[in-house]
Amino acid sequence: MDEALKKKTIRKRIITIYDQATGAIMGTVSCPYDIHLKNYTYVDGQHSGNENYVVDGKVISRPSLSTVIMIDKTVFAADGEDSVTINNLPNPCVVSVVNLDNNRCPIFNDEVTDGKLILTTKESGVYRITVNCFPYQQYTAEIEATKCA
């Protein structure tokens, strides 16, 4: 078999590289079967980091926060007094609140360490709440602040 044909018939495999300390999936690569990546931890196959992580060398689903986080209401008055309370946030987590009607301007983007966030605003619009806390999947919800009459 000549060299050109050997190069064309090299068997490849797809592997998913992950952080050994956290199990967070970093990415997926295709490489020849005989390549051993000494400085990386990996599992065979292609796996999404948005939905999975690795524990003890096994790929498992990241848990959802949708059944954990509680939002007391999804519509409130944009009067600076009425509020929305978000409870049961993981401790710690990073919460971002963005006004979708105002150039996606964030009104809050910080770490929450007490499991609760109370939002008030004087600016009407639809707000997207995003919660990040590994290994949970990213959580998103929308609330609306309405103009006062």
Image (cartoon, rainbow, N blue to C red):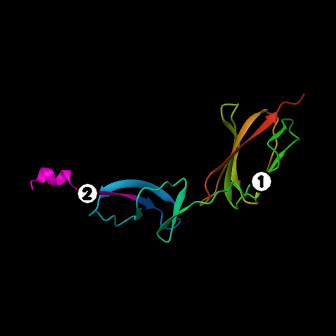
- Residue at the spot of label 2: 11
Mark 1 surroundings within 10 Å by alpha-carbon count, few (fewer than 14), some (14 through 19), many (20 or more): some
Residue visible at 51% across and 55% down? 49
Q: Amino acid at mark 2?
A: Arg
Q: Residue furthest top?
A: 149
Q: Amino acid at mark 1?
A: Met
The answer to which of 56 and 77 lies nearer the viewer is 56
Q: Which residue is mark 1?
A: 70
Residue range highlighted in magenta = 1-15
Can you say which quadrant of the picture contains the N terminus? bottom left
Q: Residue at x 62, y 52 (%)?
A: 138
Is residue 7 in the magenta section?
yes
Q: Is residue 86 above or below residue 37?
A: above
- Residue 136, percent from left and from top: 62, 58
The Cα atoms of the two marked residues, 1 and 2, are separated by 49 Å
Task: Report if residue 18 lies within the magenta region.
Answer: no
- Taking the image as shown, residue 127 lies to the left or right of residue 40, namely right
Quarter residue 75 falls in: top right
State the image coordinates of residue 25 (x, y, percent, origin top left). Answer: 49, 58
Q: How many numbered circles are shown?
A: 2
In depth, the one of 22 and 68 nearer the eye is 68
Helix, strand or loop status at disc 1: strand
Q: Nearer the viewer, residue 1 or 19?
A: 1
**Residue 113: numbered disc:** none
Q: Is residue 16 left or right of residue 23?
A: left
